[in-house]
Amino acid sequence: GAVVSQHPSRVICKSGTSVKIECRSLDFQATTMFWYRQFPKQSLMLMATSNEGSKATYEQGVEKDKFLINHASLTLSTLTVTSAHPEDSSFYICSAWGGLGYTFGSGTRLTVV
Amino acid sequence: SQQGEEDPQALSIQEGENATMNCSYKTSINNLQWYRQNSGRGLVHLILIRSNEREKHSGRLRVTLDTSKKSSSLLITASRAADTASYFCATDYRGSGSRLTFGEGTQLTVNP
């Protein structure tokens, strides 16, 4: 079945630094990738949608200069949290659409100290 | 918010009992899906029901969809402790491959 690999699974960074999260579709081409954010005991909130080779579409209230999304190929999308602050601490999940359904990564727990 | 609502928010049952979770949404949909999430993990797709379907089964799962009421239910029969997880419904409004909108989720605890 379709597999999406998301790395790292956990990351702790210092306030002010940047963190990159990778989302890779292993056995299919993902024409569209989605990035979600999830706070404890809450649902998934869509941050942005990215299509290969084009700029990401951000949801209202999501700072595009802070959350940089790159979808350079049909199998890889990256989310970079720039100048991270403690309030950016959250669980980030990617999802890839490859024509047959949505496949989710296993998530990244980001802690900013 | 475009998110739908799910109830109950939390459900605690004994092994062997059935668990029913409900989801409501706000606008017309293309299809509705149910996902499961174990604590701190990604989402696992359980079942998809299209807008022109009313009921669907998959193993111990039964999903119903009432588009007139904009609601869906997920029934897990003969629950097991391993079913303990959060369950989310998700809808797409614009067709396959478009963004998913998730419900608030139900935290299911199955006690052995």
Image (cartoon, rainbow, N blue to C red):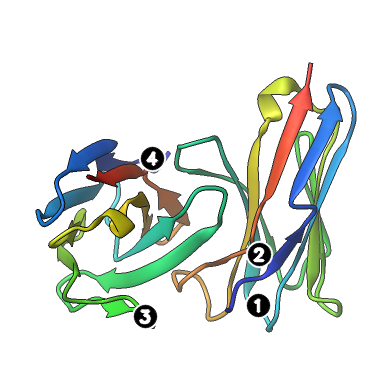
Q: Are marks 1 and 2 on the same chain?
A: yes
- Determine whether A69 is above or below A1 in the image: below
Residue highlighted by disc 2? B32
Amino acid under disc 1: Ile
x and y percentages locating residue B54 in the rendered image: 83, 64
What is the crowding at mark 4: few (fewer than 14 residues within 10 Å), some, or many (at least 20)? Answer: many
What is the crowding at mark 1: few (fewer than 14 residues within 10 Å), some, or many (at least 20)? Answer: some
Amino acid under disc 4: Ser
* Image side of residue B27 versus residue A9, left or right: right
Q: Residue at x 38, y 55 (%)?
A: A95
Amino acid under disc 2: Leu
Q: Are marks 1 and 2 in contact (CB under 8 Å)?
A: yes
Alpha carbons under labels 4 and 1: distance apart: 27 Å
Residue highlighted by disc 1? B29
Of labels 4 and 2, the one closer to you: 4
Q: Earlier in the sequence, mark 4 or mark 3?
A: 3
Amino acid under disc 3: Gly
Residue highlighted by disc 3? A61
Of labels 2 and 3, the one closer to you: 3
Q: Are marks 4 and 2 on the same chain?
A: no
Q: Can you tell which quarter of the image residue B14 is in?
A: top right
- Residue A106's label in the rendered image is 4
* Disc 1, SS: loop
Of labels 4 and 1, the one closer to you: 4
* Image side of residue B67 versus residue A41, left or right: right
